[in-house]
Image (cartoon, helix red, strand yellow):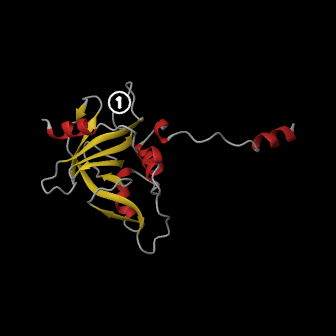
Amino acid sequence: MLSILGAATCIAAPASASILDYVGECVPFARAASGIQIWGDAWTWWSQAEAKYQRGDTPEVGAVVAFAKSAALPLGHVAVVSRIIEPRVLMVTHANWSRIGGKRGQVEQDVTLFDVSPQGDWSRVKVWYRDNRGLGSTTYPVHGFIYGRPVSGAKVAKARPAPELTGDQPDYVGSLIDAYAR
């Protein structure tokens, strides 16, 4: 019996599922999708990244958007930039935002994120919300973007975003309509 159990432990695990199959909170998803190795509530990512990864207010594909803690987001939120459409319109891939089939936790790929900050610095955004089939009415504060490049002297590897971060046919036109049609 022990030899059967021993043999069973040597069987290779099945190939990992796509990140798009993930169901759960935004933090583990963002870590897996971006390759950025930060743990803890989403609102803590910005400060944690300071000693590990470069940060800024310019979007880049593969960067994590770090939402600040707010009344609407008491734990913050993190999403991964999947496409840059124009200077004030992005697409992100994230988990646990909209309800899909009445449930939270699922992944949404290539959804619109619109910079509504007065200075155009990505400090305030609106996010596409599936239940509304468009941008939500809430404006969310954002700390900025965490890039997958380590800061000098940090003992972390350069992050490698997942290949499924973006789809084959994102809706560019829909993204612009969501952002600018009011």
Relative to residue 141, is residue 15 depicted above or below?
above
Is disc 1 surrounded by few (<14), some (14 to 19) or many (20+) residues within 10 Å? some
**Residue 32 in the image: x percent, y percent?**
48, 49
Determine whether, in the image, residue 39 is placed left or right of residue 15: left
- Residue at 20% across / 44% down in the picture? 139
Which residue is farthest front?
169
Q: Is residue 76 in view from this perspective?
A: no
Quadrant where the image shows the N terminus? top right
Quadrant of residue 15 within the rendered picture: top right
Quadrant of residue 24 within the rendered picture: top left
Toward the viewer: 16 or 131?
Answer: 16
**Residue 11 in the image: x percent, y percent?**
74, 41
Relative to residue 153, is residue 26 depicted above or below?
above
Which residue is farthest top?
101
**Amino acid on which the number 1 mark rests in the picture:** Arg
Toward the viewer: 47 or 12?
Answer: 12
Toward the viewer: 144 or 25?
Answer: 144
Toward the viewer: 161 or 139?
Answer: 161
- Residue at 20% across / 36% down in the picture? 178
- Residue at 81% across / 41% down in the picture? 7
Q: Is residue 65 in view from this perspective?
A: yes
The residue tagged with tag 1: helix, strand or loop? loop
- Residue at 47% across / 63% down in the picture? 158
Quadrant where the image shows the C terminus? top left
Determine whether, in the image, residue 81 is placed left or right of residue 28: left
**Residue 132 in the image: x percent, y percent?**
24, 29
Residue linked to disc 1: 99
